[in-house]
Amino acid sequence: MRPTLALLTLLTLSACGSGGGKNEPTNTQTQNQSPVVTISGEDQTLSLNTLRLTTNITEPEGESVIVEWSSDHAGVSFKDASENGVLVQMPTVSEDQEISVTVKVTDSANNTVSKSFTILVKALPDSAQIDLRSSYEFLAGELVTVTAKYSIDENIDDLNWQLSDLTVNDMDVSTFSRNGVAQSTVQFTAPDVADEQAYTLSLILDAVSGQISRSTQLTILPKTADELVVNLDAVYEGNENDQMLIKPIIQTSDRVVSYQWRWLDKSLGELVGETSKDVVINTQAVEEDEISSLALDVETQSGVKKSIETQIKVKNVVQTGGLSLAVNRAYAAPGQTVTVQVSADNTNDIESYEWRVDEEVFTQATESATELSLIMPNQDISMLSTLVNYKATFKNGVEVEKQAIFALMSESAIKATLDIEQSSDLPQLYKNETLTFNALAIDKAGVLDSVALDVSNVNYADLDTATLTQDGLNLSFTLKASDILLDRELMLRVVMNAGTVSTTEYVSVNLNKSNLKLFAGSEKTYISGSDFYVFGYGQERLNNPINAMSWSTNYDDLAIETLNSTDAKITNETMSSFPTVTLSARDSEDQLIQADVRTNMTSRIYDKGERYTCYFRANEVLCRDNSNTLLDVGELAAPVKAGVTKGEFVCLLKNDDELSCHGEGPLSVLEVPERAGVANIVAVSNSDMCAQYNSGNWHCWGEQADYFNNLFVGKSHIDNLIGTQQGVCLVNSGYIECYNDKSELTYQDKRSFVKSLEFVNILNKVCYTTERSTLRTCPDEIN
C-alpha cells in the first residue's frame, strides 16, 4: 500500500502546482508506521491452568520487532514467547478474578504499540487439587511419560489428556488411586524432531461442578550424543514411618556416571541409595502433614549435568491396628520368591484388603490378607526397584495403606555380586592326607541360596574326598587325594546359586607330589660362554632323611663338576641363551623329585649407576662417567663373566672367578677382600658390594658391611640377594625374605620357591616370580 499512497500524494502535489508559471522540484518524506497487533485465545480458564494466546503482528515496513509480555497480576508467568503467541501460566486465585495480560511490540524505528487481553480466572473448587509439573523435557523418539496426581471430593465423569499441535497414535492412559489421591499417567512416543519443539499437554477432568484442567509444556529435544533429560513428578506423597520409592525418568545416549539425591529443605527421612538412580525414603514421624523439596543431580560420562527438584509430602497417619509390612529380601534374583508379610495387632480385624505391585515383575503371585508371594522372572534391567502397596480396610471402616520395596536384579547383575574370598596363603594338599580349609562367600545383595563343589574336571590329582559345607557365608572344604601327579596350583570350581542364576567361582590349593621339595636356585645372568655355579637345597616336610642329590643336564656342551652333595660348577661351552641344569633326589617313597634352574646368557650386560654407564662384554668393558670420560679398568686377564655399577664404583667378575672393583670409591668398596673363587656379585647399595663364593657363602664389604654380614648369620642357604630402598631382600632356603636397615623382617613369602629376583627399571621396583606363578610380585612393603 505504501508505494500507492506515495504515488497518490505525489500526484496530488503535481496537480496543485500546474497553475503556476514555474515548475519547482517537490521533496516528499513518508512517516514510519507503528505495528498492528491482535490477540486471540480462550478468555476463561481455571486457577493454575496454562493456556496459549495467539498473536498476529503486522509490521507495515516489514521490520523486525521486539515482543514483551506483562500482566497486572504478579502470579502470572509467561513461557515460549514469540511473534506468534505465548504460553500463559495462571496464578492461584481463591475466587473468580479477571486478569489482564498485555503484549508490547516495538519495531526498529522505536515505534511501540500495546494490546491487552482479559482472562477470567476461576477459582478451583475447594475440594479439587491437581499436581502437575509446569514443564517436561523428552528426547525425540523416546517414551514420553507424564504423571499427574489429583484429589477431588466430587465424582468425575470423564478424564482426558489432550495435546495441542501434535497428533500421536500410541497414547496410553492409566489411572489408579493410592493413599486417597488419584494418579493418572499418560505415555506415548515422542515425535522425531530436527530442532527443539514445544507442545502443550493438558489433563482435563469432567466433574459435576464443571471442567477442571491443568496444562504442562512438553519440550521435545533432538537426540544428540551428549543430550541428557531428567524428569520427576511434581510431588510424591507417602505416610510417616513408611517407605517411598522415587524413580526418575532419565533419557540419554551417554553413560550416566553420577547420581546424587539431596534434601533442599528439611529432611523428611533417610535417603537409602542417595547415589543410585532410584532412591528410597524411609519417612520419619511427623506431627502434621509436611512438605519438603528433594533434588536429584545427574552427570554423564561426557560431563553433561542436569538437576531437577520435586516436592515430597509426608502425611501424618492415625495408626490403626499397628499395621506394618516386612519383606523377606531387599534384592531378588530371577526364580526367587519375594514374600511380603503383614503384621497387625489383630489381623482378624481386617475386613478387606488390596495388594498392588508397581511393576508387573512376577511370573506367579499368591496373596492373602496377611501375605503376598511373588516369583521373580528374568529381565534385562540390571536393577528394577519395585514398590508394593497394601491397603487394608478394618471392620470399623478405617482404611490404612502401607508400602514395601524390593529390587529385582538381572542375571548379569546377580553374578557380579557373588564371589569367594580366600586367604592368599594357599592350603597345601599332600597325598593320603586330609586337608580342611575355609573360605568366605561374598554375597553383596543377600541373594545367595546355595553353593556346590564341582570336581568333575580335576587334573593332576585323584581326589577320594571332596566336600563343601556351608554355614551362612562361611564355607568349609575337605579334600583327600590318593595320588598327586604334579606340583601345581589346583583351582576348584564352586557353583554359587541364586534362584535360577548360577555362576562359577574358584578356590585354590597347592598340590604337592611329595613331602620333599628341591630348590635348584633362582635365575641369574652372565655373559655368554661363562662358567657358573649352582647351589641346591632340599626341604623335607616331615623331617625324613634326604637321600643324595645330584645334578644333570640335557645340554651336551655343559660339563658338571660336583663340589659336594648340593653344589656344582658348570663349565659352559654352549651358545644357548638359557642353559638349564636339573637337581634330582628320591624321596622317602622312592619317587624321583626334580627341580630345574635356568641361567640367562647374554652377549652383553648393560648397567647404569649414579656415575657410570657400562656395557660389559666377554672381552671388553666400556664404562663412561657423566662427563663421557672412559673408565680404565685395566687389562682383562680372563673373559668377563658379569659386571655391576652403582654409586661411583664398577666391579667386574671374570671367568677365572677373580673380582676387581674400579672408579671413584668409596675406598672400602675398591679394596676387594682377598678371597678366591667368586661365583656371583651384587651391588647392594651405593657404598656396599657383596659376593657369593664357590662354597655358597656370602660376604659383603663397604660402608655398611657389618649390617649385611650380621644379617647372613644363621642363614646357610642364601641363593641370591638384592638391595632395596629400606635394606635388602634375600632368597633364603628358596623363599624371599626382606629386611629394613634395622635388620627387622618386613616381608616374607613362603608359598613357593623364588624363580627370579630383579629390579624392574620400567616399574622402578624390586620384583620376583615363583615356581608356581610367572606373574611378577612387587610388594609395597619393600618398594
Image (cartoon, rainbow, N blue to C red):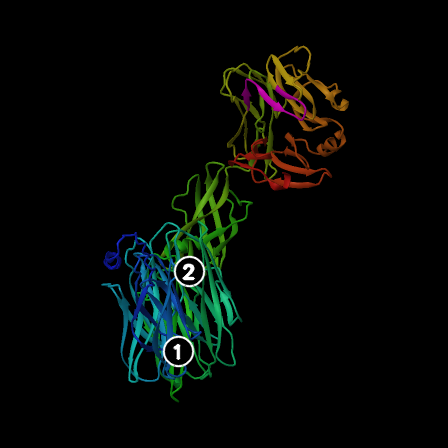
Q: Is residue 275 left or right of residue 140?
A: right
Q: Which residue is mark 2?
A: 449
Please say if 672 is above or below 430.
above
Amino acid type at image mark 2:
Asp
x 62%, y 16%: residue:
622
Magenta span has 454?
no
Q: Which residue is mark 1?
A: 179
x 72%, y 32%: residue:
708
First along the sequence among labels 2 and 1: 1
Amino acid type at image mark 1:
Asn
Secondary structure under tag 2 reads loop
Question: Marks 2 and 1: which is nearer the front?
Answer: 1
**Mark 1 Cα-neighbour bin, 10 Å: few <14, some 14–19, many ≥20:** some
Q: Is residue 390 left or right of residue 5?
A: right
Looking at the image, the residue that sits furthest to the front is 21
Q: Which residues are drawn in magenta?
A: 599-614
